[in-house]
Image: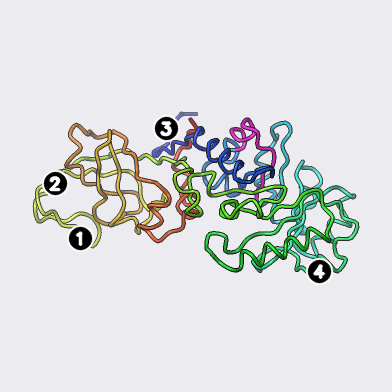
């Protein structure tokens, strides 16, 4: 087989990933700090993320589906894995064979686990205000969970990234659940919830976006480090004369003779058209503003100040998540998980 280098690179800073996890762990006080690695580690590579965080001391990991769980086998020694979407009718073989716990989300899933789970431990999600996944509080307190071997009882905060009264209401509801539903551990806080303070930590926190460089709340600013660094190669350098336009729709026109770098990256790679007007790149510390529209596979950058740049050189794409979210209107989650498979992932 011919080895072909990937056309795009996504450099991943493992030291920043571990530093982010350690900062988040410290905010939770005595609570253990887990890691959400669903959606292939938020697009960064779940296996590599799990390996780095497990080596740093993380012991609790969360994925969405059984296919994601299977892709992580074999697990590092001493870690536990939970599958957030629980068990559907077609999931029981995987749930029996894989060393992972289902997070039961409905009375139907609870019954399915009772009938086929052979008394094995499970996790349970109870909805305290999100109205997404989870048993209703009255179901959890009405006997639906009687006799289950519950390892971790979970709920999920709906508005933790905002100063919302809903946060206190969900906290009170979860405290009431803890007093009446027996489980080995209790877990409420996601990345933003961790920033709300130790009252939200309980026994186990479940950060996601903040591990990967996202800033969920102002309290995390200055503490969370960038992890993902996309890089694109220059396919062509061209001189655009004054008055000429660049790209579809002629949305950018040269006010002066301009050297333009055409990079091999576009919206098919998750670098969307909304980056126009605010996106950019650097080369050896020199800024290259994005010009024109982003195409499917190509993006143009003003390389007038990048003396020495040549075809085949790699550009570092500006990808600070909080800054990009403001400039594009995309969430930090979309910016990460949308990066496509043409990016070769390299954990360093």
- Labelled pair 4, 1 in contact (Cβ < 8 Å): no
Residue 55 colored in magenta in the image: yes
Q: Sort mark 4 into few (<14), some (14-19) or many (20+) by Cα contacts within 10 Å.
A: some
What residue is disc 4 on? Answer: 139
When asked about the image quadrant of residue 157, the answer is bottom right
- Give yes or no for contact between labels 4 and 3 (Cβ–Cβ under 8 Å): no
Callout in the foreground (3, 2): 2
Spatial separation of the CA atoms under disc 4 and disc 1: 59 Å
Determine the image quadrant of residue 158.
Answer: bottom right
Question: Which is nearer the N-term, disc 4 or disc 3?
Answer: 3
Marks 3 and 1 sit apart, C-alpha to C-alpha, by: 33 Å
- Of the numbered discs 2 and 1, the one sitting upstream in the chain is 1
Depth-wise, is mark 3 or mark 1 nearer the camera?
1
- The answer to whether mark 2 and mark 1 are in CB contact below 8 A is no
Q: At 44% from the left edge and 43% from the top edge, which residue is drawn?
A: 342
Q: Nearer the viewer, residue 69 or 284?
A: 284
Q: Is residue 128 left or right of residue 49?
A: right
Q: Secondary structure at mark 2?
A: strand
In the image, residue 136 sits, relative to residue 344, either above or below, namely: below
The boundaries of the magenta stretch are 50-63
- Mark 2 or mark 4, whichever is nearer to me: 4
**Which residue is found at the position 35% from the left and 45% from the top?**
318
Q: CA distance from mark 4 to mark 3?
A: 53 Å
Pointer 2: residues within 10 angstroms few (<14), some, or many (20+)? some
Element type where label 1 sits in the image: helix
Q: According to the image, label 2 marks what residue? A: 258
Residue placed under numbered mark 1 in the picture: 250
The residue shown at (47%, 54%) is: 218
Q: Nearer the viewer, mark 2 or mark 1?
A: 2
Q: Which residue is mark 3?
A: 5
> Is there CB contact under 8 Å for labels 3 and 1?
no
């Amino acid at each position: 087989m011919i080895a072909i280098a990937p056309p795009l690179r996504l450099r991943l800073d493992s030291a920043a990933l571990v530093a982010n996890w350690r900062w988040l762990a410290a905010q939770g006080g005595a609570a253990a700090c887990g890691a959400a690695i669903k959606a292939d580690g938020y697009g960064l590579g779940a296996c590599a993320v799990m390996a780095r965080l497990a080596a740093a001391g993380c012991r609790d990991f969360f994925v969405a589906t059984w296919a994601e769980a299977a892709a992580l086998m074999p697990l590092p020694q001493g870690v536990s894995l939970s599958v957030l979407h629980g068990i559907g009718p077609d999931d029981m073989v995987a749930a029996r064979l894989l060393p992972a716990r289902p997070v039961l989300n409905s009375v139907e899933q609870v019954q399915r686990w009772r009938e086929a789970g052979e008394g094995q431990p499970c996790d349970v999600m109870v909805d305290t205000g999100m109205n997404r996944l989870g048993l209703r509080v009255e179901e959890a307190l009405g006997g639906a969970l009687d006799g289950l071997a519950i390892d971790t009882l979970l709920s999920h905060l709906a508005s933790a990234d905002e100063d919302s009264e809903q946060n206190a209401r969900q906290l009170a509801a979860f405290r009431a659940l803890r007093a009446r539903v027996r489980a080995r551990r209790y877990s409420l806080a996601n990345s933003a919830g961790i920033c709300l303070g130790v009252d939200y930590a309980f026994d186990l926190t479940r950060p996601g976006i903040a591990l990967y460089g996202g800033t969920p709340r102002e309290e995390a600013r200055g503490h969370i480090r960038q992890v993902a660094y996309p890089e694109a190669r220059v396919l062509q350098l061209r001189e655009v004369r004054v008055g000429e336009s660049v790209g579809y729709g002629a949305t950018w026109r040269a006010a002066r003779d301009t050297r333009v770098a055409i990079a091999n990256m576009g919206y098919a790679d998750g670098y969307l058209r909304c980056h126009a007007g605010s996106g950019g790149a650097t080369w050896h510390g020199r800024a290259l503003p994005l010009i024109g529209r982003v195409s499917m596979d190509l993006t143009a950058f003003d390389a007038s100040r990048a003396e020495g740049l040549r075809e085949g050189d790699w550009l570092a794409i500006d990808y600070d998540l909080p800054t990009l979210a403001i400039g594009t209107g995309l969430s930090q989650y979309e910016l990460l998980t949308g990066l496509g498979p043409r990016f070769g992932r390299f954990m360093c």
